[in-house]
């Protein structure tokens, strides 16, 4: 499987340096970024090809991995999917735009393309998906991050946001993909609270789900990527796990 990457930042670096073609048949070959130097550096590291125009990868790539931004998803995904090329999308917040989501879903179906959304920076999505249509009544997310992670200069805890996921991703498009991921998993606009806390050095996500099945709660405490404090290491690891699963004979979980 030949893979092209859009966005050559922290997540792309972790994924690229963790995938060994000899082990899983996955070759990360093409690299595209609006900063061509970043693409060239990562391509050099991986023995791949940096492209000035993302269309240059589409005649050869079997799958495109987006690691850039919600705006990049909206710009490039329709073109990629129209060519019948599968995608892994990291900037899941783009799908909180319902019109865009419906349009992309239609394009993918018509062209027999698949869209894969990694679990990202949280655990527990398998449980949420399992109960989504079987009596799930309430889902909420409380995210707690350091001031540095959220680009704030404060010395006391502060609630930055409290409301629906669709509004959270508009205000924090590069920080709150988790809210979008959970909403996609259970097909509802979940309740979200975002707290900036100078006393934490990790990105903390607490999910609570209640319904006819009972109740469960997960707490994920992620160390941020050293090169980008807005990104959790676990987000990159979830994409690596997804990529490797494509060639597995037995798959555990959902």
Image (cartoon, rainbow, N blue to C red):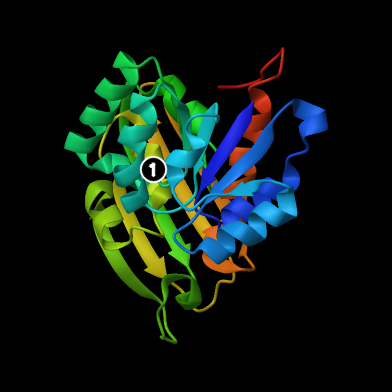
Which residue sits furthest right? 22
As drawn, 178 above or below 38: above
Residue 106 location, quadrant: top left
Residue 166 coordinates in the image, percent (x, y): 24, 47
Tell me, yes or no, if residue 140 can be seen here: no
As drawn, 30 above or below 185: below
For label 1, the residue is 92
Residue 199 coordinates in the image, percent (x, y): 54, 77
Residue 107 coordinates in the image, percent (x, y): 28, 23
In the foreground, 152 or 88: 88
User: Which residue lies at the image location 26% right of the left edge and 62% below the top edge?
Assistant: 171
Q: In the figure, is residue 117 to the left or right of 100?
A: right
User: Which residue lies at the image location 77% right of the left edge and 33% below the top edge?
Assistant: 21
Tell me, yes or no, if residue 182 can be seen here: yes
Quadrant of the snapshot with the C terminus: top right
User: Which residue lies at the image location 33% right of the left edge and 25% below the top edge?
Assistant: 82
């Amino acid at each position: 499987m030949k893979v092209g990457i859009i966005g050559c930042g922290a997540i792309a670096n972790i994924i690229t340096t963790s995938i060994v073609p000899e082990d899983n048949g996955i070759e990360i070959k093409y690299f595209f970024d609006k900063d061509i130097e970043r693409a060239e550096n990562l391509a050099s590291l991986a023995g791949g090809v940096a492209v000035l125009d993302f269309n240059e990868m589409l005649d050869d790539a079997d799958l495109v991995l987006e690691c850039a931004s919600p705006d990049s998803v909206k710009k490039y995904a329709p073109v990629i999917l129209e060519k019948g090329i599968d995608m892994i999308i990291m900037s899941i917040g783009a799908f909180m735009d319902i019109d865009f989501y419906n349009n992309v879903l239609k394009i993918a179906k018509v062209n027999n393309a698949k869209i894969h959304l990694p679990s990202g920076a949280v655990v527990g999505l398998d449980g949420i998906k399992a109960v989504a249509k079987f009596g799930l009544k309430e889902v909420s997310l409380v995210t707690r991050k350091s001031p540095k992670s959220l680009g704030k200069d404060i010395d006391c805890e502060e609630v930055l946001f409290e409301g629906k996921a669709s509004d959270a991703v508009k205000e924090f498009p590069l920080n709150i993909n988790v809210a979008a991921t959970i909403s996609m998993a259970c097909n509802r606009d979940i309740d979200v609270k975002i707290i900036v806390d100078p006393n934490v050095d990790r990105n903390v996500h607490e999910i609570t789900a209640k319904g006819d099945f009972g109740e469960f709660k997960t707490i994920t405490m992620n160390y941020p990527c050293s090169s980008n404090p807005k990104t959790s290491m676990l987000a990159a690891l979830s994409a690596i796990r997804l990529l490797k699963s494509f060639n597995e004979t037995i798959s555990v979980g959902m």
